[in-house]
Amino acid sequence: MLRGLYGWVMTQAEGRYALWALAIISFAESSFFPIPPDVMLIPMILAARQRAWLIAGVCTVASVGGGLAGYAIGYYLFDALGRPLLEFYHYLDQFTRFQARYNEWGAWIVAFFGLTPFPYKVITIASGVTELNVITFTIASALSRAARFFLEAVLLWHFGAPIKAFIERRLGLLTFVFFAMLFLGFFLLKFVI
């Protein structure tokens, strides 16, 4: 089943609507969707290495746009949903202190987590909730997301055939590692952060 899914994704990665699908997934992942765009970005670049820069660029632009949508979710829905809950539980003062600390380090937080497999939507929504300066947020998002996706593009462009062979030989293990990292990110979000 896993090999069939891999084959299907590789076929879709070469399809005429692949860039649109990547843009939608990348946008959605930055604001509400749980699966990162790498699951489409990697096979797309492996399938069409000559388009690596275009693919990384589309992924970056869509991710930053989705990040702004996540920011808007946090910014506009906090007063309607978040603030009443904080007031009900008498946590508004603690939130105000958290907000000040977050905004003091906000650019670094956005830049760091924009590079990692941590669920980026958490950072985009938190940035809106804490009212991090939107220009700071956008610049940090653009730099970190571009660094992440273009680094992947460079590595896949340069090492394309050997990496593709490695992925195909160890597909089960790599799938396990990917989902373990995804679940670890959600675990950290729920119990640590």
Image (cartoon, rainbow, N blue to C red):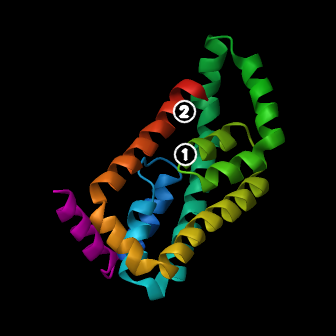
- Closer to the camera in the image, 142 or 77: 142
What residue is disc 1 on? Answer: 118
Residue drawn 52% across the image and 69% down it:
59
Q: Residues within 10 Å of mark 2 (few under 14, many from 20)?
A: few
Describe residue 151's horizontal placement relative to residue 8 as left or right: right
Magenta-colored span: 1-17
| Residue 110 place in picture, x, y as percent | 69, 49
| Residue 186 place in picture, x, y as percent | 48, 36
Describe residue 110's horizontal placement relative to residue 105 as left or right: left
Image height check: is 175 above or below 54?
Answer: above
Q: Determine which of the numbered discs, if any, sits on residue 189 in the image.
A: 2
The dominant secondary structure in magenta is: helix
Describe residue 105's horizontal placement relative to residue 153 as left or right: right
Extreme bottom residue here? 50
Question: Could you tell me the amino acid type at mark 1?
Answer: Phe
Residue 65 lies in the magenta stretch: no
- Report the quarter where the N terminus lies: bottom left
Question: Could you tell me the amino acid type at mark 2?
Answer: Leu
